[in-house]
Image (tube, helix red, strand yellow):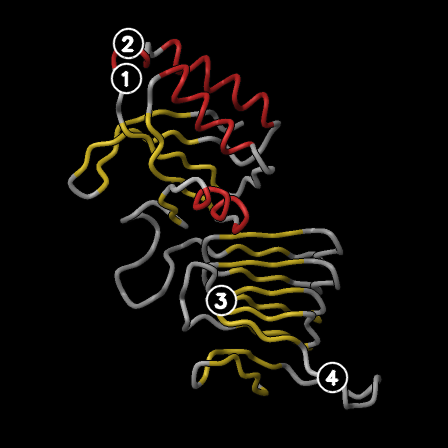
Amino acid sequence: MHTVELKSWRNGLLQELLLAIPSEGDWNEAWNRVETLFEEAKVSASLSGAQLTIDVGMRVLAPGDLEWLVDRIKTQFGLLTVAVVSTDNASREAAMRLGLNTYLMLPGGNKTDAGTGFKNNALYLPQTIRSGQRIVHDGHLIVGGDVNAGAEVIAAGDIIIAGTLRGLAHAGSGGDESARIFAGCMRPHQLRIAGEIARSPEETAAPNAPRRPEVARIESGAIQVFSV
């Protein structure tokens, strides 16, 4: 099991603290581990007033959880939260509503220096993503099955779906307009690339007509879909 970690890190010219909370596990249990760690490190006595970045990874924060966490850390231990690292859109939006900086990954972290590629962090899921499931990843995402209606797949890089895309796919979630969405059969509820959004057009072909693999990418400022 991953553990809560507190360490010093340099954000540009600033020396800050980094609190890493594992993506897995119960939220209340995670807070108990944070509290124990801070008390053992005597944070309130030695580091009061220090700036803190919180890394929650793929964890989806329920409404109010982040505000509660930031407030408890400030009032109980005297640390000032200034930023949140998260691959989940809702969690980053919650951070922005609190006036915090947001990162998809730590500055100077996993991205390669060449172009918009990602370094050794593609995620392969061999199964179908079912309705109600939401997958978020900070690199390229490959799905070996379908993405059903009501499911969401979100990636900072490209998204490749071997089967049929019927749900929502968001590539380039951190703002990468060169990201692409590939699908063996493209019938999405919604496509998103960076900040652009496109809905599936009205079906004109016969329901049982064969479909060719297609790719969606941004062309001339809008999402366009092309046969592969």
Q: CA distance from mark 3 to mark 2?
A: 46 Å
* Nearer to the camera, 37 or 61: 61
Question: Which of disc 3 and disc 1 is earlier in sequence?
Answer: 1
| Disc 1 and disc 2 in contact, CB within 8 angstroms | yes
Query: How many residues crowd mark 3 within 10 Å: few (<14), some (14–19), many (20+)?
Result: many
- The residue type indicated by label 2 comes to Ala
The first of marks 3 and 2 along the sequence is 2
Name which residue lies at 69% across and 65% down. 167
Residue occupied by mark 3? 158
Q: Is residue 155 left or right of residue 13?
A: right
Report x, y in % for residue 123.
Answer: 53, 54
SS assignment at label 1: loop
Amino acid tagged 4? Glu
Q: Secondary structure at mark 2?
A: helix
The image shows a total of numbered marks equal to: 4
Left or right: 121 in relation to 132: left
Q: Give the CA separation, mark 1 to mark 3.
A: 42 Å
Residue denoted by label 2: 45
Check the picture and name the quadrant holding the N terminus: top right
